[in-house]
Image (cartoon, rainbow, N blue to C red):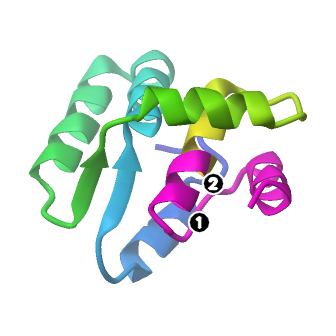
C-alpha cells in the first residue's frame, strides 16, 4: 500500500503504541472511503474487520450536538470531520495523533 505518503510513518507509530486507541466514527468513515476509492473495496472491508475485531481499539460514536457547537466556534476553514476529531480528542482528554498540520494548529488554538 504505497499510495499514502504517511503510510510507513503510520505503521511505525501504530506498532509503537501501547494502550487503547480511540477511533471516532468520522475517521472510520474517511479511512474506509479512501481505501475503497484509492485501493479497493476489499482493503476497506479488511480495515473495518480489523478495527471491529481489535480489542485495543475503542470505537467512539460521534456526539453530533457537541461537534456542531465546536465546529461553529472555530473561525478557521476546516472540514466538519476534522473538527469532530479535535472535539472528541479534547472531550475524552486523549492524545491527538495526526499528520495533518491544520488539525494540530486548530487544536492548539481551540484547546
At 29% from the left edge and 71% from the top edge, which residue is drawn?
20
Q: Secondary structure at mark 1?
A: helix
| Rendered location of residue 85, percent (x, y) | 56, 45
Q: Are marks 2 and 1 in contact (CB under 8 Å)?
A: yes
Tell me if 15 is positioned left or right of 59 in this view.
right
Q: Which of the image's four quarters has the C terminus?
A: bottom right
Q: Which residue is mark 1?
A: 9
Tell me if 87 is positioned left or right of 104 in this view.
left
Q: Secondary structure at mark 2?
A: loop
At 79% from the left edge and 54% from the top edge, which residue is drawn?
110
In the picture shown, does residue 92 fall above or below 47? below
Q: CA distance from mark 2 to mark 1?
A: 5 Å
In the picture shown, does residue 1 fall above or below 62? below
In the picture shown, does residue 30 fall above or below 57? above
Tell me if 3 is positioned left or right of 23 in this view.
right
At 39% from the left edge and 35% from the top edge, which residue is drawn?
62
Q: Residue 95: within the magenta?
A: yes
Q: Which residue is mark 2?
A: 6
Q: Which residues are magenta?
A: 87-111
| Rendered location of residue 66, percent (x, y) | 53, 36
| Rendered location of residue 70, percent (x, y) | 66, 37
At 38% from the left edge and 28% from the top edge, which residue is drawn?
32
Determine the image quadrant of residue 107: bottom right
Query: Front-most of 59 and 35?
Result: 59
Query: Front-most of 11 and 49?
Result: 49
Amino acid at each position: 500500500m504505497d499510495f499514502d505518503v504517511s503510510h510507513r510513518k503510520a505503521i511505525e507509530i501504530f506498532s509503537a503504541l501501547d494502550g487503547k486507541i480511540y477511533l471516532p466514527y468520522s475517521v472510520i468513515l474517511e479511512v474506509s472511503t479512501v481505501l475503497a476509492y484509492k485501493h479497493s473495496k476489499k482493503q476497506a472491508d479488511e480495515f473495518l474487520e480489523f478495527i471491529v475485531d481489535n480489542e485495543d481499539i475503542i470505537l467512539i460514536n460521534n456526539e453530533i450536538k457537541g461537534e456542531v457547537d465546536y465546529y461553529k466556534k472555530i473561525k478557521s476553514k476546516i472540514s466538519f470531520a476534522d473538527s469532530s476529531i479535535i472535539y472528541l480528542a479534547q472531550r475524552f482528554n486523549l492524545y491527538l495523533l495526526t499528520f495533518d498540520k491544520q488539525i494540530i494548529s486548530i487544536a492548539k488554538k481551540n484547546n
